[in-house]
Image (spheres, rainbow, N blue to C red):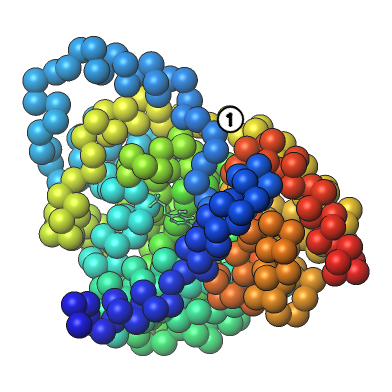
Amino acid sequence: MVLSDKVASSLGKASWIRKMFEEGDRLRKIYGPEKVFDFTLGNPSVEPPEKFNEQLKTLALNPEPGMHRYMSNAGYPETRSAVAEVIAEQSDLPFTAQHIVMTVGAGGGLNVVLKAILNPGDEVIALSPYFVEYGFYVDNHGGVLKVVPNDEKFLPDLDAIASAINEKTRAIIINSPNNPTGVVYPAETLASLGKLVTEKSQQWGRPIFVLSDEPYAKIVYDGVKVPSVFPYITNAIMVTSHSKDLALPGERIGYIAVNPRINGVNQLVEGLIFCNRTLGFVNAPALMQRLVKGLQRESVNIEEYQEKRDVLYNHLTSLGFEIQKPQGAFYLFPKSPLADDLEFTRVALNHNILVVPGGGFGTPGYFRLSYCIEMDTIKRSLPAWTSLAQELGL
Ligand code: PLP
């Protein structure tokens, strides 16, 4: 056996997103790419803002000596300062470069935080439906994922979280705007969670952290605002990236921001920098750090996503699908018309529609579709959705 038992067993349970992607390839070969409607992947269809391309050209035409060398493991001080300035404005708290660590995407950032705070057997709470990689990230660092279902509006169920917390609980991961539901947590929810975490940290005599995973924070619709977690949650550690808001997922650039009010904040940041290095990331990509420094107030064209959301949401709800209208991110999470979401996924495949079953996010009975695909594909898919609804008798 060339693999560890754990990796071999994880490969055996290949993710639903991956499985559907392969199924899509099979269908594309049979029917042609125009006739297959793949809603499985969260890979942005929009391009980075024009300013990104301009700055990239300027940098390429005027290379500075040393610009590709290692820098401090936390990242360039100027980039960290630029990030801190915006977060200080949003939170009204004294953020400085000292509270920011540049990372290899949000995925890299979450691994750095978990390595820094977890002892073997510590528990991390995820709220279902949740981004499935959390389970692997927690396991990477000897932790145990504990899943607590959200309420029927996909908001955190504070009583259920309170009952799930015990002496082993070290962190709660939240994700707003949410993948897969598109829900944005209001300030009151963050305030209640902050209060609960402070009380429980006192009860068990060590800090419980809230890891706020926010790669979709700028992708919001209808004027919705995403409240900063920091004024409401003292023990908040925010992890994010520019994979979605600047459409740079392949460039692997993100950061961790630590609430300046955390007791022991300096030691925590020192630990994060150490873990960024020893996990082998060493530092976030240098060129990208130089570029995102000047792009902290930019984002991709959100209107494009909103139009896509509206076309799909309006069509699917008119057919009888039950969907909570997403306020952000670029996913819909409709109720499966069949009790068995796997069976629904199979029926959808007969119409060349590829979606991910809710079970893949810890919430069976639903399915996820990503609308970060071409508008043309969305529009061509509408008759297929109609015939799917007819087959199911909606
Ligand atoms: N968190 C959530 C909720 C995501 O949806 C994703 C990517 O899809 C990530 C984290 C990881 O993003 P990154 O590309 O920044 O590692």
Q: Is residue 77 above or below residue 347?
A: above
Three-letter code for the amino acid on which mark 1 is drawn: Asn
Tell me the element at label 1. Answer: loop
Q: Quadrant of residue 261?
A: bottom left
Please provide percent x and percent y for residue 283.
Answer: 18, 45
Location of mark 1 (residue): 301
Please provide percent x and percent y for residue 321.
Answer: 82, 62
Q: How many marks?
A: 1
Q: Is residue 217 left or right of residue 265?
A: right
Please provide percent x and percent y for residue 264.
Answer: 23, 62
Front residue of 70 and 350 = 350
Q: Is mark 1 within 8 Å of ligand 1?
A: no
In percent of the image, x 69 and y 52: which residue is there?
326
Front residue of 244 and 210 = 244
Quadrant including the C terminus: bottom right
Q: Is residue 138 above or below residue 78?
A: below
Quadrant including the N terminus: bottom left
Q: Is residue 206 visible?
A: no
Please provide percent x and percent y for residue 141.
Answer: 26, 73
Q: Is residue 101 left or right of residue 28?
A: left
